[in-house]
Amino acid sequence: MDFDHPSALCNKLARGELDIALASSFEFLRNPVYQVVDDVSISSAGPVYSVVIAHSGDISEIREIELDPASETSAKLLRCLLAELNFAPLFSRTSTSVITAHRARLFIGDQAIRFRQRHAEEFHFWDLGEQWNKLVGLPFVYALWLIRPEVRDSKALAERLRKLRDENLADIDKLIAEENEFDHDFCRRYYRENLHFSFGEKEKAGLREFNRRCREQRLLPLGQVEAESRDIDLRLRCV
């Protein structure tokens, strides 16, 4: 098992150092050579809680946003959402500056949860999953199981991953009981309400919409934007 951060896993998968990985959805849009495990994703259909902009004051006053280098998907989602607001702050990759009325910060994952719970009364939190759902009315897909095209028995691998997902969801109360950092009531809400683990028609529609908006904002490689203008369904090789 490799538990590196999302962007590192994407790089390892692209270099062939991994045959399969739970990787960011943007990695698939950027490099659509992979087979996708059907019916499994990490998604949200509303507030996700763990992908947020922490800010002080009104969101329109922000002039700079510090990005988390661990997740390109969240950064690209943020750019798509801000473009809809005709809002173009500066972006930086540092994470040491103080959050002010004009400087905000993107948090993802456990870091976002810790920060929100420790500073709930100090800052505002702009939930990217919630904003996406308000904008397009569809789920947002953060991560997918991606399999390199040369891997044999991909169908058997995909079936094992779907079975593992089902087993983990069936044992969710047991897994939550073993959690020793976060409040168990919070974990129940988070895993049952904030996160979704399917990759059905609504999630695929959300991914297609993200693909379209990334193309509009020129967030994909230029050659790919020109060559891959057809619907993403034609590139989704689900197993």
Image: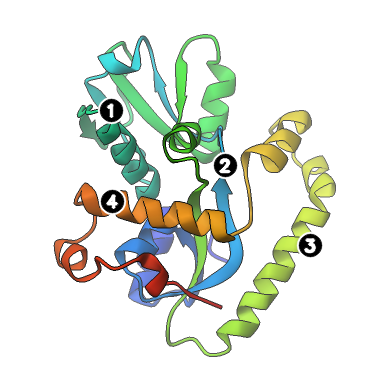
Q: Disc 3 or disc 4, which is closer to the eye? A: 4
N-terminal of the two: label 4 or label 2? Answer: 2
Nearer to us in this view, 180 or 191: 191
Nearest the viewer among 27 and 113 is: 27
Q: Viewed as shown, does residue 1 lie left or right of 183?
A: left
Q: Secondary structure at mark 3?
A: helix
Residue 5 in sight here: no
Q: Which amino acid lies under the numbered mark 3 shown in the image of this protein?
A: Glu
Q: Where does label 4 land, which residue? A: 214
Earlier residue among tags 3 and 4: 3
Say how many tags the image has.
Answer: 4
Nearer to us: label 3 or label 2: 2
In the rendered structure, which disc, 2 or 1, sits on the residue that comes first in sequence? 2
Identify residue for label 2. 45
Residue receiving disc 3: 167
**Residue located 38% across and 77% down the image:** 16
